Image (cartoon, helix red, strand yellow):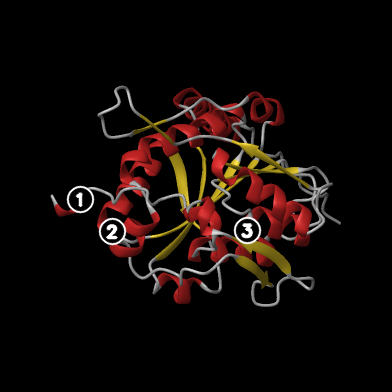
Amino acid sequence: MGDLAASPPLDVIHISEDLTPLPELKPAGNTDITFDGQLSRPLRLREDLRTGCGGQTWPAGMVLGKHMLRYHRHELQDARILELGAGGGLVGLAVALGCGVESRLMLTDQNEMLELMKHNIALNEVGSKATASILNWQVHARRQAQETPLPVGEPLPQEVLDYKPNVILAGECVYFEPAFPLLMRTLQDLVALNPDAIIYFCFKKRRRADMQFVKMARKAFTVSEIFDDDRPIFSRQSLFLFTFTAKASKAAAAAAGRDSQTRKESRTEEPSPVVVAAPAL
């Protein structure tokens, strides 16, 4: 049962004790980030743990941000992009600064992170390219005062339903096992909203139980490990980088199979070309 060990409570002190190694817990302040030179103009990020664990940079966000800048810089101009669990907005703001996006991307997280996301949008002067919104895929609720808070989810907000994102960015969203089903439900809802959407998903494995989320994802989506020149480096740090896309429905797969068979039969039934011999000279 070691693989199913309980996740630590969602608390800075518990996380700092139970999940290792962690980035250094920093005092509140601004950090300039270029993603190893991928940004000519540094991203300036306000980090502040008083807003929660998402208030500072984490390894998976750095990997995902660099990947998007390095390999998708010229593909996202017309994309409708949503960052899930954005924290301070590291990945989404990197895309806003470096990928020439033309529609305003959405940074989303819990209410506690809203002001930090807004602050970082203003700090980087990308108000025309990014917005900050609340998307609670995990909140804690008590049915009775004496009960331990339980994670519960909320439906997608109307502004997300209207936006219909086709690119979802999720860095460092795997950290609390009881919330795995809620995160999966939110990802499924986003893909159901736009079946052509692609999810770029990066996380750091800190416990064996974290890989249960990947097993869940493989049942729900087509999961692919994507190319990255840095994979040998970040893999040694137990960082994983995937894309999730919608699985073809059984009906679509059956239709594709019938279409393939029809094309095959059509080729088989085509009459052989008639060869006319040239007259002898």
Q: Which mark is residue 125?
A: none
- Within 10 Å of the Cα at label 2, are there few (<14), some (14-19), or many (20+) other Cα atoms? many
Q: The C terminus lies in which quarter of the figure?
A: bottom right
The residue that appears at 71% across and 72% down in the rendered structure is 38
Mark 3: which secondary structure? Answer: helix
- Within 10 Å of the Cα at label 1, are there few (<14), some (14-19), or many (20+) other Cα atoms? few
What separation in Å lies between label 1 and label 2 (alpha carbons)? 8 Å
What separation in Å lies between label 3 and label 2 (alpha carbons)? 24 Å
What separation in Å lies between label 1 and label 3 (alpha carbons)? 30 Å
Q: Which mark is residue 90?
A: 3
Q: Nearer the viewer, residue 117 or 59?
A: 117
Q: Is residue 157 above or below residue 221?
A: above
Q: Nearer the viewer, residue 236 or 121?
A: 121
Question: Does residue 247 show up?
Answer: no
User: Mark 1–mark 2 contact, CB under 8 Å?
Assistant: yes
* Residue at the extreme right of the image, as rendered: 281
Label 2: which residue? 207
Q: Nearer the viewer, residue 117 or 186?
A: 117
Three-letter amino acid code of the residue under disc 3: Leu
Left or right: residue 31 compared with residue 109 = right
Give the quarter of the image for residue 56.
bottom right
The spot of residue 97 in percent (x, y) is: 77, 60
Give the quarter of the image for residue 74.
bottom right
User: Mark 3–mark 2 contact, CB under 8 Å?
Assistant: no
Left or right: residue 204 compared with residue 168 = left
* Residue at the extreme left of the image, as rendered: 1
Label 1: which residue? 5
